[in-house]
Image: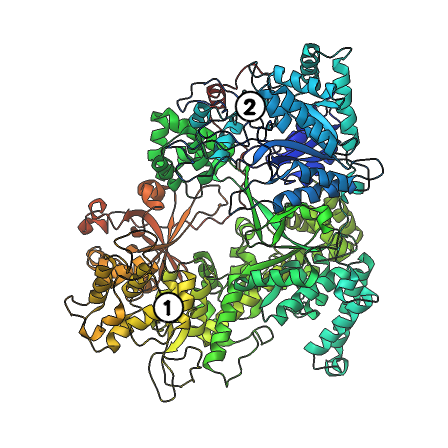
Amino acid sequence: MWFPHLHVASAFSAHYGVARPEELARAAAGQGAEILACTDRDGLYGAVKHVLACQEHGIAPVLGVDLALLREPVQHAGAPGGARPRAGSTPQRGGAVRPGGNPVPARGNGSGPGSGSAGPVRPGSAAARGGRRTAAPRVVGRVVVLATGHDGGSGYAALCRLVSAAHRSHDRAAASPIGLTAAQLARHVHRAARSGEPGLVVLVGPDSDAGRLLARRHYRGAREALNRWRARLPPGALVVETTTHLAPQGEALSTGHAVRLYELGRAADVPVVLSNAVRYAHPGQAVTADVLDAARTLMSLDELAGADRGVLQPNGQGWLKDGPRMERLAHEIVTAARVDRDTPARLLVDTHHLAERCRLDPQGDLGIGTPVIPEASVLGLSGDPDRELARRCYAGLARLHAGEDWDRTVPGLNRESLRERLERELSVISQLGFAGYFLTVGEVSDLMSAMDVRHAARGSGVSSLVVHLLGISPADPLEYDLVFERFLSPLRPNLPDIDIDMESARRHDVYRRIFERFGPRRVTLMSMQNAYRSRGAVRDAGLALGLGPQDVDHVAGQLWRVPGGTLREEISRRPELAPLAQRLRDNRQMDLLVDLTERLDRLPRHISMHPCGVILSDTTLLDRTPVQASGIGLPMSQYDKHDMDPMGLIKLDILGVRMQSTLAHAVAEVARLHPHEALPDLDTMPRDDPDTFRLISSTHTLGCFQIESPGQRELIGTMGPEEFNDLVVDISLFRPGPMQANMVRPYLDARHGWSTPVYPHPDLEEILAETRGVAVYHEQIMRIMDRMTGCGLGRADVWRRLLGSPGEEPVETAFREGARARGYTRAVIDTVWEILHAFGSFGFCKAHGVAFAVPTYQSAWLKTHHPEAFMAGVWEHDPGMYPARLLVGEARRMGIPVLGPDVNRSGEHHRVEAVTPRPGTVVSGDLDAGIPHTQDGAWGIRMSLSAITGISSAEIERLLAGQPYENLAAVRARARPSRRSLQRLATAGALDGLLHGSGTRASRADMVHFLTDRAQLPARGSAGRTGPGQGQLALPLGDVDLTSLPARLPELTPQERVRAEMETMDIEVSAHLMDSHAELVRAYRATRAQDLLGLRSGSEVVVAGVRVSTMTPPMRSGRRVVFISLDDGSGAVDCTFFDEAQAASGEVLFAPTLLLVHGHTRRTGPRGIGIQAVRAWDLSRPETLPDPRTLLGSCPTPSRPPRRDGPARARQPRGQGSGPRATTQQAFGHGAGVR
């Protein structure tokens, strides 16, 4: 007989459940189960995945929530279960394993009595060290609430609103728990009741208020608690849940506790059901649950066991047991109960009966697969949406093509192409019923335009002329020969994605405007599940084992991009982790740490706001998804992006892109500097500027979108882009798939005339000509299929999506038959099919390439024609992969002066400033005044005050509002900075202008000393107090005249200035960090980055610099290659470390900031050169450096430096990885006695 588990936590019960919904459904199906519930803690986080997994395995899903029960606001003294514990009392705690691995008798359970109560904090515990408490003392228990099914979705809707209400009561700042009082819960159940069916069913189980009282043998209090539940809830809404985990008698979750719950329910004539309070799929996962308990409470397992909190599970029995095992448990409970004429069968029948009541119809109850968009009235539509969409598209044609008479001004052929394409797209959209969706996205785009927020579509949506005409995409799909069917066709009727990139700095403003426009009942943000990775898993596993924070931090700090699921294997084979591997061999604690880390890898850890997802719907939205507050205060769905399509939730990907903010900043700066000169519209200007392409081909592309990485600079240096389409090809080729398939070299050879393009058949030359015979784009594959078989582009896209998948075989059959019918030979068909088959793993959408190439060109154009404004935008919004240090060096290389922060001249943002005064040029004073352009003036970039760390945003606002300042006293009086902030302003040089303007001979060092000396004295009126009250300087600076400041200290040396800048801004402005190592670098005869291009390939060199990036992309061969970029002050040096160099360099590969690298040059094109490293050293540790007299010439020049291995697709982690699981299982006391 199968058993319906109705209390099951999935892994999406973060820090509690262990098994994913797919694993649980698979296990249930293997047991022959027909119904399975998912009752995650505090939310429905795994609900959609559970429903889909149940559908896949032929199981009916049940949904519910495991919710905290909060204390009622008013309590009566002495009421059982209602009084607060007396001061100093210690709630029960559970058991654990000692860090050494020896089992300790365990008590309690994660869902047992006390699990929701916070006890006193013991000295030295995680909570005493500033960690989270287990929960607030307001929690008096937990209950499970199930939604009833086959009721048109009313039960599921009530469950969603119940969960949302529980989160509304949660105050994260006050650390209040997520939950409801019994009265609040009862009100929700009553609202859900209709036609005699309650809609929601409350399971009062072992961790409820009544269950906790029974665990302490407060029988009268338990009866009163159950009676209160019965009085509050409508008929049929109350069920008692009994559970035994075979804990020792007298404890929670013992058989005795289960018997008392059973007797309580029978005596009150309340139905009783059996559950197993499932936390994992099989007993082997019990250890992981223990570690999650420790992570949830931020206490070690020893602390939890010693404090007897009842948080830890008593044993490993909380798994998804099969029917026979659950029957035996039912027999144990019923036969031990003092209930006349009761049989175990009744308990099981009641459980099955409740399961049948709550089984859900995915389509009828949840609306699975049915998309819902905002009502037409919300969009201002009173008529046909199809007609309105057509009207707006033709208005877009008039706007883009010379006004209302566009059909006369546009040349005939283009006019007919536009009209035919538009009518075809509108027909498909109408046929699929998607006009309202397009109008909704267009409305959002219009909102952003009205807010003057830069935005542009990306992805396959760029293929649509309708998207272009609605103003969502700046790229004309006809101009770039894009295929609409790649985006949408009648053969692929699912709702398409129209993704939009927008200014990252304005993202939250746009979200709030969308909420205002559509209303909170129709809009919510999307969430994302953040999973454990190696570093986080090590920290939580180390906490569970009670390891010292420093020891755990040391291990975690070494795991840079190390997969947690195969941590043991990675440690054994990575040379930089050799010391850690030795510790594993010598220390059993460390060995256990690795095993626990592998167990945690990729489990959900916490939920957060998705960076770009906005959900739009009609007023039923909150009936279909529970919501909770996001980090910015707006509600977000508890469902992630994978749940959107199944639930019919319309997701708009509105991604905040830093480059869009950079472009907006640069355009605003150009307009401010040159108010009388018209700047071309970046979105509509021609993309054919020769100077821009010269800049791109020069590889001086730091800061430019998509083409600044070492690999991209190498590719564009070899390729030499000359037109916009070249950028599209470049961006499409520089992907893991094309690199893996070795597509780059044939394209480059054909492009430069080193080989002749090869076309499989003359019919395909037109399709492949733009990429020199190499199939790069999805659209090309679709056209090849259509050309050779006549299948149509819509069918071709369906076939393309099956390439490389198990469904490819029928595609091959259909392709071969269709091509033979059109007269193609067997040889041609075989050749083309090889191309199609291989393409499944590496294709790229041309529309996506076009979408990316537009901001690539725009950023390069601005860097070419307005470099100061562009670099100011890059510094302000940090859109690329490199730190500001390298970008400052790039500005210097371009001849742009870098001006440090100044209390009078700096603004809120980095901005351009005239540094060579000319008549009519404003250099200081009113920061809002324009700076007239002078042809022979020089421009620099003034850093903002926010570049100085440690100064609050409120202080910066006051500093800006009080400008200009005539002296230090004015700064203090108007801006009221704290002592520390004023010291940091002085240290960074932001007060130098006041000092020099005062006529004193004192130095910056004198001012810093002056301010620091006074900071040692107590604040006025503090009477010697220290602490939070020290917000102001000790002496009234108005009484101190800077002109009389004694000049006792010399000006800072260049090295001292750099140290001061690094201390206050994390970036050196006045000089480069490597300048202080110049003598050492000269001793090694190091070659500067700017001189490398003059060397032959294979030349032996030494380079030195500051690490600016480290990358380990997956490679075609499967072997790791490390790419390190260094900045030596003259430019970037890209170094490649293959296996032998990694082994020789060891720990130096990832940790040090300053590196000395020995290797050979490797030419990659006319403008491309890098270093194939032999070994690296930490430049900041002179004692480890080699003898400079013997380093050069110490290794032979390779005759053929190996080519860089092309990146491949990232491999998936290998499940839980390897490790001594059985040993760990026994250490945690879960290795035997499975029942």
Tell whether 1138 sits left or right of 828. Answer: left
Disc 1 to disc 2, C-alpha distance: 61 Å
Residue type, mark 1 in image:
Ala
- Residue 138, image x, y percentages: 56, 36
Q: Residues within 10 Å of mark 1 (few under 14, many from 20)?
A: many
Residue 919 sits in which quadrant? bottom left
- Residue 559, image x, y percentages: 41, 40
Residue placed furthest toward the front: 77
Q: Which residue is mark 1?
A: 975
At x 51%, y 29%, the residue is 85
Residue placed furthest toward the bottom: 919
Colour setting:
rainbow
**Is 568 placed above or below 802 here?**
above
At x 84%, y 67%, the residue is 383
Q: Which residue is mark 2?
A: 284
In depth, the one of 863 and 962 nearer the eye is 962
- Residue 579, image x, y percentages: 33, 34
Quadrant of the image containing the N terminus: top right
Determine the secondary structure under disc 2: helix
Residue 182 sits in which quadrant? top right
Q: Earlier in the sequence, mark 1 or mark 2?
A: 2
Q: Residues within 10 Å of mark 2 (few under 14, many from 20)?
A: some
